[in-house]
């Protein structure tokens, strides 16, 4: 329900104040009824039910144009979370090939370590060729 705007110079009366207070209460009820709970379980620090508004989602991409690579070689990668999470977040990482190179389709991506402020991993090139890839990283956890 929209509250009618007062006319300039219009005296404020009890009915108008009641409409304002009633609309604010209705809005509060709508917001509080839409609060959902999610479960965060990183297997290390916590297994906790948390309201969704206490969760933090961090998503980023890291592009590596390595040029020519040899099969069996590897490279480390890392992503810093700023600000950091309250506990170690749940992190996923996927690799995307940005060229038609078959070498970019044959990559092993590993997450080696996750802290509240950083994720470290490794890219293993399983084929020789030209590489231009993007690593997509998503972290979910409790915010500070």
Image: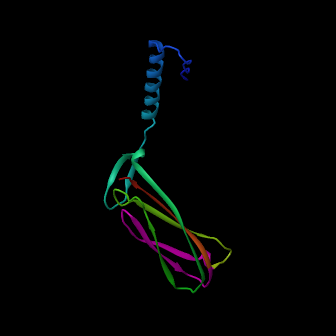
Give the camera-side residue of 36 and 78.
78
Of residues 110 and 15, the one drawn nearer to the viewer in this rendering: 15
What is the chief secondary structure element of the magenta stretch? strand
Identify the residue at image location x=46%, y=31%: 30
Residues in magenta?
A: 103-130
Up the image or down, 106 lies above or below 15; here it is below
- Residue 37: where, in percent of width, then height? 40, 43
Give the number of marks.
Answer: 0
Q: Looking at the image, which residue sits at the far front?
A: 9
Residue located at (43% from left, 33% from top): 33
Q: Is residue 96 above or below residue 82?
A: below
Q: Residue furthest right?
A: 100
- Where does the image place residue 34, in percent across and percent down from the top left? 46, 36
Image quarter in which the N terminus is found? top right
Q: Decide whether residue 121 is among the magenta residues.
A: yes
Q: Is residue 70 left or right of residue 141?
A: right
> Vertically, is 7 above or below 24?
above
Quarter occupied by residue 22: top left
Q: Quadrant of residue 68?
A: bottom right
- Which color scheme is applied? rainbow
Residue shown at the point (34%, 58%) measured from the top left: 87
Depth check: give the residue in front, 75 or 15: 15
- x and y percentages locating residue 86 in the rendered image: 34, 56
Taking the view exactly as shown, the residue that stands out farthest to the left is 45
Task: Identify which residue, 64 or 111, lies in the foreground.
Answer: 64
The percent coordinates of residue 94 (x first, y second) are 53, 66
Q: Is residue 42 above or below residue 72?
A: above
């Amino acid at each position: 329900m929209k509250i009618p705007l007062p006319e300039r110079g219009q005296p404020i009366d009890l009915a108008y104040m009641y409409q304002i207070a009633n609309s604010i209460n209705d809005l509060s009820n709508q917001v509080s009824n839409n609060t959902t709970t999610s479960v965060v379980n990183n297997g290390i620090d916590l297994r906790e039910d948390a309201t969704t508004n206490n969760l933090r989602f961090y998503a980023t991409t890291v592009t590596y144009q390595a040029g020519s690579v040899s099969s069996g070689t590897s490279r480390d990668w890392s992503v810093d979370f700023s600000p950091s999470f309250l506990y170690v977040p749940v992190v996923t990482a996927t690799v995307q090939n940005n060229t038609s190179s078959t070498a970019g389709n044959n990559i092993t991506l590993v997450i080696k370590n996750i802290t509240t402020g950083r994720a470290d991993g490794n890219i293993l090139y399983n084929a020789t060729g030209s590489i231009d890839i993007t690593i997509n990283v998503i972290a979910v956890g409790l915010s500070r």
